[in-house]
């Protein structure tokens, strides 16, 4: 589906507010890819996010994220741009390799320049004081959440990991206010993740969000938001370089915990010794 052509075809069917949204999208679709639903409603000069919802539903789409994925596909210059924005089908192996590595390094350094160290400090304190830490994420984000579960367990922390709705729901059903929920979501718009964050608040739990969108639905309900600064909110909507940056953020929290509590090194040494017995 070419969503831009669809917007043009349905233009006469739109209300006045919907036409404002359509005009903004058609004028600069790439800029719209960087917008949250609230950004789009504000920039288009419509009253509320509800107008945006009505707009994409009139296109027979189910969500704003689905709209952005289709928009990215419509404006990509080449098929490979969907896989990786800076790569073209004319690039050789060396060129593509350099672009991937350099983009990843750039994402890490960009995040370093923009990350809120006060938020990092708050996250460290929440990790330190939590009775239990629950890590959740889906798809690529699940790999990051599982890596964190492994790391912090080695420090003697009581940790859980889940990437299944039923298991997460069960964990939260018996959770306590002294537990901590750590959510990993590049877009910050995964419905289940947002709903579980809201459920955690009902229990009295604190929520840490690691996301690529500081204005996302997840960011709005989290107590601490740690934002990755990557280009993936433009053409690519899946997590590639952001996954590496998410790992670096969690490694930073891990290192700060150890640096401030040398006793944790004892747990780390015990973990290493236990694992060594499993190897030749």
Image (spheres, rainbow, N blue to C red):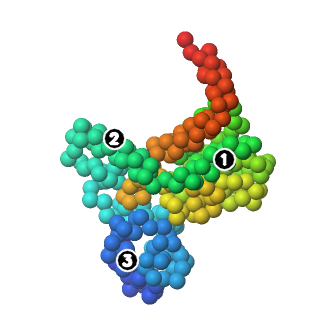
Which mark, residue 209? none
Q: Nearer the viewer, residue 208 or 34?
A: 208
> Label 3 neighbourhood size at 10 Å, few (<14), some (14-19), many (20+)?
some
Indicate whether 15 appears above or below 29: below
Left or right: residue 160 versus residue 56 is: right
- Select label 2 or label 1 by which is in front: 1
Residue at disc 2, secondary structure: helix
Residue indicated by mark 2:
101
Residue indicated by mark 3:
24
Spatial separation of the CA atoms under disc 3 and disc 2: 34 Å
Residue 228 % position (x, y) = 47, 52
Q: Nearer the viewer, residue 241 or 76?
A: 241
Indicate whether 50 appears above or below 105: below
Q: State the residue at coordinates (25%, 50%).
A: 88
Choose the circle earlier in sequence order: 2 or 1: 2
Q: Nearer the viewer, residue 51 or 197?
A: 197
Residue 95 % position (x, y) = 24, 41
On-image quarter of the C terminus: top right
Residue indicated by mark 1:
125
On-image quarter of the N terminus: bottom left
Q: State the residue at coordinates (52%, 64%).
A: 215
Q: In the displayed image of the protein, which residue is found farthest to the top? A: 280
Q: State the residue at coordinates (40%, 69%).
A: 32
Spatial separation of the CA atoms under disc 1 and disc 3: 43 Å
Are the residues at dot 3 and dot 2 in contact (C-beta closer than 8 Å)?
A: no
Q: Nearer the viewer, residue 23 or 176?
A: 176
Residue at disc 1, secondary structure: helix
Residue 251 % position (x, y) = 53, 39
Indicate whether 190 appears above or below 36: above
Indicate whether 149 appears above or below 29: above
């Amino acid at each position: 589906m070419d969503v831009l052509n669809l917007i043009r075809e349905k233009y006469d069917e739109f209300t006045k507010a919907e036409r404002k949204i359509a005009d903004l999208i058609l004028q600069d679709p790439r800029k719209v890819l960087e917008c949250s639903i609230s950004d789009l409603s504000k920039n288009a000069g419509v009253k509320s996010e509800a107008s945006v919802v009505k707009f994409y539903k009139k296109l027979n789409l189910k969500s704003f994220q689905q709209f952005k994925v289709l928009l990215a596909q419509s404006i990509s210059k080449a098929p490979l741009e969907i896989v990786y924005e800076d790569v073209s089908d004319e690039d050789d192996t060396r060129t593509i390799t350099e672009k991937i590595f350099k983009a990843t390094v750039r994402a890490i350094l960009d995040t370093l320049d923009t990350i809120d160290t006060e938020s990092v400090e708050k996250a460290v304190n929440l990790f330190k004081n939590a009775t239990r830490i629950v890590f959740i994420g889906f798809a690529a984000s699940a790999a990051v959440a599982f890596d964190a579960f492994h790391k912090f367990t080695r420090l003697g922390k009581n940790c859980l990991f889940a990437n299944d709705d039923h298991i997460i729901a069960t964990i939260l059903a018996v959770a306590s206010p002294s537990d901590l929920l750590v959510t990993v979501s590049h877009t910050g718009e995964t419905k289940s993740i947002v709903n579980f964050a809201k459920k955690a608040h009902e229990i009295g739990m604190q929520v840490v969000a690691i996301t690529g969108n500081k204005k996302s639905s997840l960011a709005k309900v989290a107590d601490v938001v740690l934002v990755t600064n990557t280009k993936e909110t433009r053409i690519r909507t899946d997590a590639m370089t952001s996954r590496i940056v998410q790992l670096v953020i969690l490694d930073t929290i891990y290192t700060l915990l150890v640096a401030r509590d040398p006793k944790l090194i004892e747990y780390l040494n015990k973990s290493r010794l236990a694992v060594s017995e499993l190897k030749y």
